[in-house]
Image: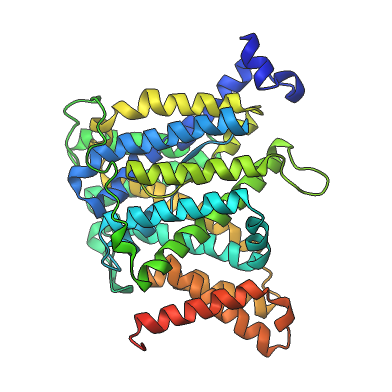
Amino acid sequence: MGWFEEYFEFERYGTNMRTEILAGITTFMTMAYILFVNPSILSVAMGKGAFNTLVAVTALSAGITTIIMGIYAKKPFALAPGMGLNGYFTYSVVLGMGYSWQVALAAVFVEGLIFIVLSVTKVRSAVINAIPMSQKYAVGAGIGLFLTFIGLNDVSFITATAKSGVLQFTGLNYSAMVSKAGLLFLFGLFLAAILIAYRMKGALLISILTTATLGWLTGAAPWPHHFFSMPTVSYTFLKLDLKGLLNVGALGVIFAFLMVDFFDTIGTVTGLSAKAGYLTKEGKIPDSEKILLTDAIGTTLGALLGTSTVTTYIESASGIEEGGRTGMTALVVGLLFLAIGLFIAPLAGAIPAFATAPALVIVGYYMMSTIKQVDFSDPADAIPAFLVIMAIPFTYSISVGIGLGFISYTIIKAFRGKWKEVHPLMWVLAIIFAAYFAYLGGAF
């Protein structure tokens, strides 16, 4: 025990082993829902046969990367495949744009490599400073609506499909709302909301398991034949198709993954560091390069294993609230993912869509909260932000939303005579996106 206390600097942070372990358990309980939700989303793109592998891959990528965060960066931050980007992977890149899931994994892998380079060079600072804050916040809010759409679609409350990046929406399905599955979805949604209102730890996990159990008891879903099995990763391991990225359209996919991952990580890490008391007087994050590099390594590793982008989870705040201040907290989280998550594929596979869909809607609520950071008194900032928020769910494409936001931001600023406020890199990105949209529209 003495080695752990010395290595993780318990005395410096005023913590102890018991506090760190409890904090780790709390964080794991808060984010363990990803073991059920991530496979359910990605298996839509990869096929039902991938589900068991995806449970193991989710646990492996989360467990290994979080352990690296604990031992290398020594921070109480946990990582797992990110919500929003798994939806973009499935519904935009694979189902919407028509790429194979193997090509989508290759895009995630390349994005991870670029993220690694950005994390170890000064380019990172240039990119951070180039993108206006309003655009960063808008992307998060837009993804929140995107996830809500997916959740409602999973239980047929709405019928929406995406073809060639265009959303086809057929309206509200009232019969689905009063079906057994629909009523159970509403139960799970309100249960999660009430638990969250009471600040209950693990609210989403409790909602998923309770709703699933009610579904089994009422016959709305079949009981699991068994709860545990040995893990397998054979379906997705090293199945990347790098050759499939050799076209202009794939560049937009890679950039969208990179954009969302990079700024979501920065925003999450900044918020968590502030909560844990790490920020310096200048607002800087100690060891930020180590944190970002760990995140980037997690994305690269996750793509090799077979999952979408791995990122730092804001749910880590629950463990920080419990007193977790060192990498020991993350180490506990990572070990729990490996000890539990690797073996629960049969249980995860028996969780019906109406039990996981409420989690998607609630995560959408969490992500939408970033919109309050946008200054709506300044139309030059607010209108481009609005266009991002509107475009992401309505087109089922994060990259379209980002591109529309960048282009509109630079144009509006230029016509207001404030073109000097626009970072040169934003002009470059806007031109690239304009050319990308022209290519997709068949202009050349």
Task: Pick whichever, 225 or 182, lies toward us.
Answer: 225
Check the picture and name the quadrant holding the N terminus.
Answer: top right
**Relative image position of residue 157 (x, y in whole percent):** 29, 60
Q: Residue at x 73, y 83 (%)?
A: 418
Residue pushed farthest right?
Answer: 281
The x and y percentages for residue 408 are 56, 81
Residue drawn at 60 percent across, 28 percent down: 327
Residue 312 appears anywhere in the view:
no
Displayed quadrant of residue 322: top right
Name the residue: 22% across, 33% down.
217
Decide if residue 390 is in sight here: yes
Number of labelled discs?
Answer: 0
Quadrant (top left, top right, bottom left, bottom right) of the C terminus: bottom left
Work out whether residue 187 or residue 379 is closer to the camera in this orientation and state it. Answer: 379
Q: Residue furthest top?
A: 2
Q: How is the image coloured?
A: rainbow
Q: Is residue 387 above or below residue 283?
A: below
Q: Is residue 279 above or below residue 407?
A: above
Residue 377 or 267: which is nearer the viewer? 267
Q: Residue at x 26, y 32 (%)?
A: 345
Report x, y in % for residue 358.
38, 48
The location of residue 140, given as percent across then percent down, is: 53, 59
The answer to whether 376 appears left or right of 346 in the picture is right
